[in-house]
Image: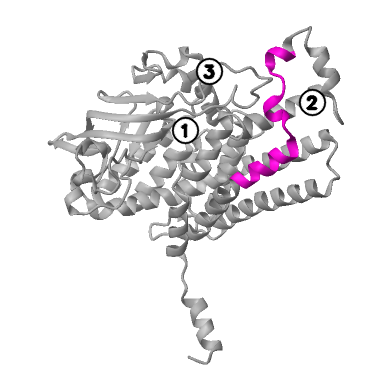
Amino acid sequence: MALRTPDDYLASLTDGRELYYKGRRVDDLLADPELRVAVEHAAIDYRVAEDPAYRDLAVMTDPDSGEEYSRYYHVPRSAEDLLERSRLIETCTSLGGTMVTLIKEIGSDGLFALLRVCEGEALERATAFWQHCRDNDLAVAVAQTDVKGDRSKAPHQQDDPDVYVHIVDQNADGIVVRGAKCHTSISTNADYVIVFPTRAMGEADADYAVAFAVPTNAPGLKMYISSYSAGDRNEFEFPLSSKHKMLETLTVFDDVFVPWSHVFMAREPEKAGQLALTFVEYHRFTAVSYKLPLVDLLVGAAGEIAQMNGVIKAGHIRDKLTHLIMYAETVRALTEMAASRARIDDRGIAYPDPMTTNMAKYTFATNYHQALELVQDCSGGLLVTGPGGDDWASDEVRPVLEKYYAAAAPANDRLRMLHLISDLTARDFGGYHAVLAVHAEGSVEAEKLQTFRSYDPRPAMGYARRLAGLD
């Protein structure tokens, strides 16, 4: 058991994995400047373990062996365990400029789900794989969302059977899988990918009811990296996206062999929905935890630019700031409550309260775009008409900008704050956040459905009946 250093992590990524970016094969992930930004960002999950300011939060000690391991891989047993996990996720995302690192967060979400749902030999395999990830301090992605094809049809009804990942062969050594997953975050720079079913399934979909893990350099595994947010970025104009990025892939399984030791579900449609939902219970809690730095930044940036513009005392500005504060603090309170209301399953594993977790995610998602409007209103039109990095670097142009863009703060401070807000709300980094708010970790409709399903109406309805004299 050993904690990896950031350099250990980076060195592990040159292993022959099959990557494609902008229509070309990528032979060396670290050699491409645009892709390396994302890798360096992800390494935050390893740097916090070496930083004395965060080490106590990021690292735990095994009471039996005395060996250290990442808190991310600590199986939660209590509400306090979930709160500490949330704080670690928030801390790493804060260090990442509001962009979650995710290379240990999502994988451990998946591992906890396996430990709760698997039974018998599958549980033994899941436990061994969890120990392997913990003891070797691995980076682990999760591929859950199939490309789905015609969504009005079940997996077995599709014209192309490969639009859902499925088993095409099996023998005494393992299974062979084919198909594709999309929206797979950080798979390019992970050590393993865990694959989960995307939905509940019937008997006719048995071949698609599969869960397994493979190393990211497995033969036949191909990852096509989204080019969204590509391009060179200077730090003055892009203070966030020049340093923080997460890669997403179309993840194709082209007859990938998986040994039985890494197969956790094979042709068990009755368990597919349960495993998918159990993973989501953890991953939505991870989601609202990593949104906390983002909502805090919306409050802080709006307040700072209002101060710099000289409008902080205006009644309508204070009203907007109040709305932003209430939004941020409501998401935070619900996130902490989801951990405080932790439930413990019959195996002694804690999980966040599903109803409160979904309420937190729903509150964040349905109010996010209004929050962007409030921040932009406090900022002004310079978010999109202001000068860029080349202008600021020009000895001839900069004095003009310093003269005419000064307000209640010097032009340097004001323009840098405006570029921070523009990067966050008006450019492709902001667009990425805005789409994540709606679609990542499940849709708004899914959150509403889970909130309704998780609520027990019997106490409230019984109370109403008693007051009405019916019982």
Q: Earlier in the sequence, mark 2 or mark 1?
A: 1
Q: Which residues fall within the magenta stretch?
A: 369-392
Tell me the quarter of the picture where residue 296 sits.
top right
Label 2 Cα neighbours within 10 Å, binned few <14 / some 14-19 / many ≥20: some
469 or 435: nearer the eye?
A: 435
Height in image: 80 above or below 410?
below
The majority secondary structure of the magenta stretch comes to helix
Front-most of 218 and 296? 296
For residue 211, what is the image quadrant? top left
Marks 3, 1: nearer the viewer: 3
Q: Is there a contact, CB below 8 Å, between mark 2 and mark 1?
A: no
**Residue identified by numbered label 3:** 231
* Residue displayed at 78% across by 27% down: 414
Residue occupied by mark 2: 413
Location of residue 369 in the rendering, given as x and y in whole percent from the top left corner: 59, 44
- Within the magenta stretch, is there residue 391? yes
Name the residue tied to disc 1: 103
Say which label, 3 or 2, has the lower sequence index.
Answer: 3
